[in-house]
Amino acid sequence: MPSPASYLLLNPAKPFYLRRLSHPPTPPYPSPRLHARRLHVSCDAPRGSGGVGGRREAIPAGASKAKKQIVFFDAAPPVAQPQPQPQPQQGGSAAEKGESGKATTKEGGGNAALALLRRATKKTLSALSNLPLAISEMFAIAALMALGTVIDQGEAPSYYLEKFPEDNPVFGFITWRWILTPGFDHMFSSPVFLGLLALLAASLMACTYTTQLPMVKVARRWSFTHSGERIKKQEFADCLPRASIQDLGVILMGAGYEVFTKGPSLYAFKGLAGRYAPIGVHLAMLFIMAGATLSATGSFKGSVDVPQGLNFVIGDVMKPRGVLSVAPDVFNTEVHVNRFYMEYYDSGEVLQFYSDLSLFNLDGKEVMRKTIKVNDPLRYGGITIYQTDWGFSALQVKKNGEGPFNLAMAPLKLNGDKKLFGTFLPLEDSDSSNPSVKGISMLARDLQSIVLYDQDGKFVGVRRPSSKLPIEINGNEILIEDAIGSTGLDLKTDPGVPIVYAGFGALMLTTCISYLSHSQVQALPNGKFKC
């Protein structure tokens, strides 16, 4: 059978362009002899209308743009007939015909619904990938984070009712309703904050899909050009009269370019990683937001004041912070406070305080021991124990050689941040008929010195617990044996912290990579165009 090109006679006075496509023809027109490739012909003559198969149609000379004469011959390549569709048997029931019609209707409705879904998806991606929208979302998140540092977090509702009353609103309009209703007392787990994070994540993913990925695909494409005019139209273009393609390729390779040639054309590039970096930045930000969300919805937190020598179970003080909080087995661990002590400045102010802690499993075996201090916590099984505060638990006192008695120390309210603790040692048995019981008052600002007053409230003296020196008060010998402190501990589990750290590390790395410029070089020998 003759080649398919022989069935089209073109006017040789006008050149034409022949483009070969390497992929085979698609059904339902298979050709046993022409399966390797198909041909595409472009010309300026308009397409004529008329019959085919045996009739000869010529385009009149006066027709618009009629510069060629196309002749169709009787002989033509055989055209495969489409496969016949199974026809329903005549006399079929009305139910079968109705089912066939319903199937056709459902298929048409499904195509329409799919097209509608695609249009809606495209519009949604276009709206989410809008840069001003993403910037607005980031500013809103930053504003809420700043507001969360100003408003005290995690307090009881009564605290906000007292601090933000309706009769005296802050700034003239901020009351407790503005804080408790949207959940700003737990800012970083509030629906508003988490919703903005989700919206920003959607914008980043939409921008990556619609903008960054197509840019990477274009940058990875080897762009060989065979047009000198196209090169001249570039912003940076020059003509090198005495250079050759081979020499230019060697120079570019020495400058770090990847060089490729195709016939007389040269293409080189470097810095392709700079095109991938924005995608990495977006992924890093998604990691940070995912970690922050997991921290807000899947963590546990608790605090406890434990006197020296006592213990507690971790699970008894931990409270879930969100719907994704799952208690691990390590919550059964018991913590024992072996010792609590403090260091002081020369002026007497507290310098640092320490807690010697031991951890025991369900079998009573010590699994870990560490002395913690401020900024040096204990970490075990995903739980972190921080040293955050201290207190005065009890005072051991001997009276006239009897005891020692443990007198509980109560915190006293003072103006400012100074701490003051006090206790009372009665000198006679309490009587319900005589409510005014007299005794010795003892005050302390820390664990190193105790101030004593007699039953009339007069100052008697100061004693250090370590001095072992007795003091006479109202005919009674008082000896301060020991001052027992209490440690203030904060416990926390935060599964999102490793994800946030990894996200910030990736963000710094990809931000630095994004400064690498993507450069491309295209070159042709000067025989292909005029300089």
Image (tube, grey):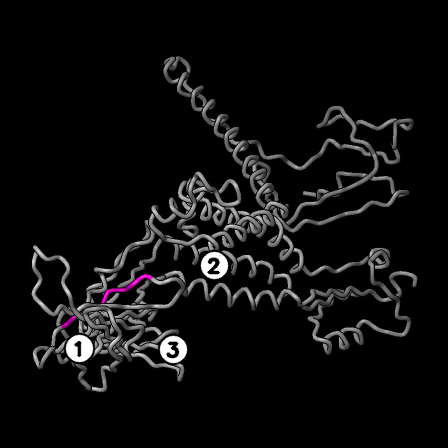
Left or right of 67? Residue 26 is left
From which residue to which does the magenta span run?
A: 406-413
Circle 3: residue type: Glu
Q: Residue at x 71, y 42 (%)?
A: 4
Residue 512 image position (x, y, % from top left)? 61, 68
Residue at 71 percent across and 68 percent down: it is: 260
Foreground pick, 339 / 69 = 339
The residue that label 2 is drawn on is 287
- N-terminal of the pair, mark 1 or mark 3, is 3
Q: Is residue 221 left or right of residue 403?
A: right
Label 1, label 3: how far apart the Cα atoms are: 28 Å
Which quadrant of the figure has residue 325? bottom left
Q: Which of label 1 and label 2 is nearer to you?
A: 1
What residue sits 43% from the left and 47% below the top? 184
Q: Residue 31 placed where, x, y %?
A: 60, 42
Q: Amino acid at mark 1?
A: Ile
Q: Is residue 411 magenta?
A: yes
Residues packed near mark 3 inside 10 Å, few (<14), some (14 to 19) or many (20 plus): few
Residue 180 place in picture, x, y as percent: 40, 43
Residue 473 disc label: 1
Secondary structure under the numbered disc 1 in the rendered image = strand
Residue 381 can be seen, yes or no: no
The residue identified by callout 3 is 349
Q: Main secondary structure of the magenta part?
A: strand
Among the two numbered marks 3 and 2 on one chain, the one whose residue lies closer to the N terminus: 2
Is 320 or 15 nearer to us in this picture?
A: 320
Q: Are marks 1 and 3 in contact (CB under 8 Å)?
A: no
Task: Please tell me whether mark 1 or mark 3 is closer to you in this view.
Answer: 1
Indicate left or right for 292 with 331 as reference.
right
